[in-house]
Amino acid sequence: MQLLQFPMIPHSFSGAVATLVPAAELVIGCMLLLGFKSRIAAILGECMFMIFTFIIVWTIISKRKVACFCFGENDGTISWMTFFRNLFLIVLLAPCLFMNHSAEVGIIANAIFLPIYGLAGMLLFLSIFHLAAQHREVYAKI
């Protein structure tokens, strides 16, 4: 299991973390897309991205060669490109923290936030794909 390469995650919790992270990503993505508790979802998403970014920086600084598995099995080794991708996603999600979701949003605001929700949809799809692949792997071992 890939999580075993990170000493900050106890081995006894790695199975639970491997299951809960994609599930949390899926829930957060759905909340953002549906506009349900969007500010809470944005805060949770930003927190997850920041935790992932911390782990990425720690991995790079400690000079470990670890596969990323961030968007699937063939995502390559964790590198500074992974770090900058995460920073980009953090910046892209940030406007959702400040949106007034209860008010009518104008045409200009829609033009700004539509790509953000599009990205959330893409991440939701990737999370579903990742979760399905993980469960397929678990059931193959049974």
Image (cartoon, helix red, strand yellow):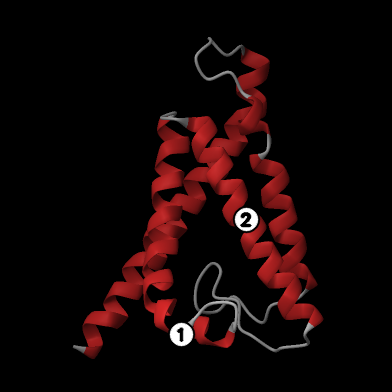
| Residue on which the image places disc 1 | 11
Q: Are marks 1 and 2 in contact (CB under 8 Å)?
A: no
Q: Position of residue 87 (x, y in %)?
A: 74, 54
Q: Position of residue 74 (x, y in %)?
A: 55, 79
The residue under the point 67% across, 32% down is 95
Sequence-first disc among 1 and 2: 1
Q: Which quarter of the figure has residue 116? A: top right
Q: Is residue 126 left or right of residue 95?
A: left
The residue under the point 37% across, 58% down is 23
The residue under the point 67% across, 71% down is 55
Q: Is residue 100 left or right of residue 102?
A: right
Quarter containing the C terminus: bottom left
Q: Position of residue 96 (x, y in %)?
A: 61, 32
Q: Residues within 10 Å of mark 2 (few under 14, many from 20)?
A: some
The residue under the point 58% across, 18% down is 100
Q: Nearer the viewer, residue 119 or 87?
A: 87
65 is higher (above) or lower (below) than 133:
below
| Residue on which the image places disc 2 | 49
Q: Residues within 10 Å of mark 1 (few under 14, many from 20)?
A: some
130 is higher (above) or lower (below) than 63:
above
Q: Nearer the viewer, residue 68 or 20?
A: 20
Three-letter code, disc 1: His
96 is higher (above) or lower (below) than 51:
above
| SS assignment at label 1 | helix
Three-letter code, disc 2: Phe
Label 1 and label 2: CA atoms lie apart by 22 Å
Q: Nearer the viewer, mark 1 or mark 2?
A: 1
